[in-house]
Amino acid sequence: MNIESDQNTTAKEKEFLKINDMIKKLGVTRTQFWRMRKAGDVPPPVIRNPQMWLASQVKEFYERRGNKEDVGTL
């Protein structure tokens, strides 16, 4: 068992993204981000004040969305 890789996995699972991180990752403006959030194109935050998202959940959200869009285009 590799303890170092287990610690890296745990750290990645607990990485939080703030709104500015989300905006950077998505490459959108703050206004566009809030429009996307209202439309359901962004997952809800796991912490409400200040709003923060778990990086692993954001990644899963977009992977699932990508898979649904791929199926729709076949």
Image (cartoon, rainbow, N blue to C red):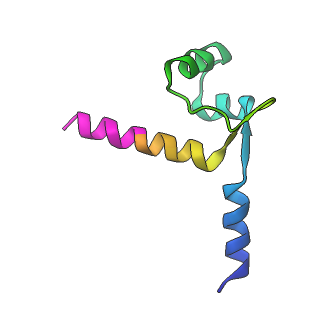
Instruction: Tell me what residue is drawn at x 61 percent, y 20 percent.
Output: 33
Quick one: which residue is furthest to the bottom in this view? Answer: 1
* x then y, percent, for residue 57: 58, 46
Residue 1 included in the magenta stretch of the image: no
The range drawn in magenta is: 65-74
**Vertically, is 55 above or below 10?**
above
What residue lies at 50% left-to-right and 41% top-to-bottom? 61
Q: Is residue 20 left or right of residue 29?
A: right
Q: Per the image, is 66 magenta?
A: yes
Residue 43 sits in quarter: top right
Secondary structure that dominates the magenta span = helix
Give the farthest residue toward the right. 50
Q: Residue at x 48, y 40 (%)?
A: 62
| Front residue (pair 73, 56) | 56
Q: Quadrant for residue 21, please give it.
A: top right
Residue at image coords 54%, 20%: 36
Judged left or right of residue 72, residue 46 is right
x and y percent of residue 4 in the render? 73, 76
Left or right placement of residue 33 versus residue 63 in this view: right
Q: Position of residue 38 (x, y in %)?
A: 56, 17
Image quadrant where one finds the C terminus: top left
Quadrant position of residue 44: top right
Q: Position of residue 70 (x, y in %)?
A: 29, 39
In terms of depth relative to the viewer, which is nearer, 29 or 38? 38
Quick check: 34 above or below 63? above
Number of numbered tags placed on the structure image: 0
Is residue 62 found left or right of 5 in the rendered image? left
- Work out which quarter of the rendered image holds the N terminus and state it: bottom right
